[in-house]
Amino acid sequence: MNNPGLAFVSDVFEDYHNKTILMKLPSYHTISIRNLNVYIENQHILQDINLTIPEKSITCIIGPSGCGKSTLLRTLNRMHDDTPEVKINGQVIVDDEDIYGVNVNVIDVRKKMGLLAQRPCPLPMSIFDNVAYGPRIHGLKKRKAINQTVIQYLQYVGLWDEVRGRVRNSASKLSIGQQQRLCLARGLAIEPEYILGDEATSALDPISTKKIEEMFVKLKEQYTIILVTHTLRQAKRIADYIVFMYLGKIIESGSTEEFFNNPKKQLTRDYLSGSFS
C-alpha cells in the first residue's frame, strides 16, 4: 500500500468499502425533568422547570441570551458538578433514574450524553486518535476493533472520504466545520444514548452548518437529540419539538408546527415577531 495514511486500516477496510454502516441502535430512552431549580451564586437561574423530552426526535431549546438555555442543557449531564457556587434541586429522570439521586455514577451519566459544544474542541492528537480516545478509555483494546470503530464513525459523520489519506495527521489541521464533525464522531464512538448540542453550529459557515444539521436529522432516527440554538430559522428547519425559555422559565413548549403557527402565549408571539431577542 503506497499511501501510509491508509496503512492502519489495511486489515479492515474491505469490510466497510461500499457498504452501509450498521450502527448499534439504542433502545428507547426518556428524559423527564421535574420541579428543577438551579441557583448560581444565589441567583435563581432556572425556576420550576418541568419538561419531558420526546424520544427519537430533535428538541430545540430557544430563547433570548441569558434565559437559562445552556444552564438547562448542562443539568442533563451534570456538568455543573464542579462549580461550587451552583445549587440544584428537583429531579432529572434519565432512563428511570434520577441522575441527581444518591449513589448515582456520574461517569455513567455523562457517557450516556454525547455533547457537541459551541466551538469544536478536537483533542491535541491525530484525527484517528480523537475518535479512538473514548473507546480506548472505556476498555476497547484490540487494534482491529479500534480501527473498525474509527472508520465507522468517520463514515457516519461524512468525514471518512475527506480524511482517509491523512488520519494520522493532527486534527487541528482540519477546517472548523470538519473539526465539529470530528467532535461529533468522537462523541458517537462511545455509543451514547442522547446527543446534546450547545449552539453547535454558531461558529460555522453556512455550508458546514447545513452538513451538521443534516447529520442531526439523520441521527434522530437512533438518538434523542436536545439542541440549544439562538437561531429561530434553524429550529424551524430541523426541530420536531420546541422549548421556549425566558428569564429562567419555560414559557411554552410543543411541536414545531404548533409552536410557530399557533403560539399560545403573548410572550411567545412577541419573541417570534422580533419584539425582543
Image: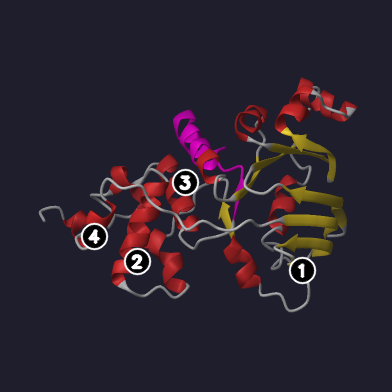
Looking at the picture, does residue 135 appear above or below residue 203?
below
Circle 2: element type: helix
Q: What element carries label 4?
A: helix
Q: Are marks 4 and 3 in contact (CB under 8 Å)?
A: no
Point out the frontmost of discs 4 and 3: 4
Cα gap from disc 4 to disc 2, whole angstroms: 10 Å
Measured as percent of width and height from the top left, residue 9 is found at 23, 60
Instruction: Tell me if residue 125 can be seen.
Output: no
Residue at the spot x=46%, y=66% of the render?
134
Cα separation, mark 3 vs mark 2, equals: 21 Å
| Amino acid at pointer 2 | Ile
Quick one: label 2 or label 1, which is nearer the N terminus? 1
- Identity, as a three-letter code, of the amino acid under mark 1: Tyr
Q: Viewed as shown, does residue 81 lie left or right of 172?
A: right
Percent of width and height locating residue 54: 70, 47
Residue drawn at 80 percent across, 55 percent down: 33
Indicate the secondary structure of the residue bearing disc 1. loop
Give above or below for 134 relative to 61. below
In the picture of the structure, the residue carrying the numbered disc 4 is: 9
What separation in Å lies between label 2 and label 1 (alpha carbons)?
33 Å
* Residue placed under numbered mark 1 in the picture: 100
Tell me where the magenta segment starts and ends, as one range. 194-216
Q: In the image, what residue occupies the spot 65% across and 38% down?
A: 229
Q: Which numbered disc, 3 or 2, marks the residue closer to the eye?
A: 2
First in sequence: mark 4 vs mark 2: 4
| Residue identifier under label 2 | 146
Label 3: which residue? 180
